[in-house]
Image (cartoon, rainbow, N blue to C red):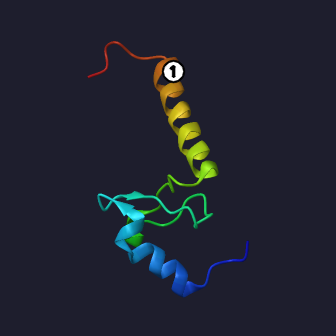
Amino acid sequence: MENPTKETLENWKNDDKYWIWGCIYYNPDDQRILPPKRIAWMGWTVNFANKKSLLVFVAILIIIVALTVFLPHNKYRL
């Protein structure tokens, strides 16, 4: 697949049909793993239509849960 043009990328970012409830990005044509959010300074998001992107999202969740569960906790911490 060829790289999308800047105009196409801008259209994907601004078109409401690719954003569920305005915050969940779902675009089967976009192959980027972590596309930028609508507001650029807020970072990146997951394209829930892309399987690779979903795998990265699940991997990050697993790491966070594993760190939370398996790191030693100080029971006296406030």
Q: Secondary structure at mark 1?
A: loop
Task: From the viewer's side, name the closer residue of 72 and 32.
Answer: 32
* Position of the N terminus by quadrant: bottom right
Residue 16 figure quarter: bottom left
Q: Nearer the viewer, residue 60 or 30?
A: 30
Q: Which residue was labeled with disc 1?
A: 71
Provide residue 56's location: percent of width, then percent of height.
59, 45
Q: Quadrant of residue 58?
A: top right
Residue 59 or 75: which is nearer the viewer?
59
Give percent across and percent down for residue 75: 34, 12
What residue type is disc 1 on?
Answer: Leu
Residue 46 % position (x, y): 50, 54
State left or right for residue 33 relative to residue 24.
right
The answer to whether 19 appears left or right of 67 in the picture is: left
Q: Please report the residue visible at 38 percent of the width from the left and 63 percent of the height from the top.
A: 19
Q: Is residue 75 above or below residue 61?
A: above
Q: Quadrant of the C terminus?
A: top left
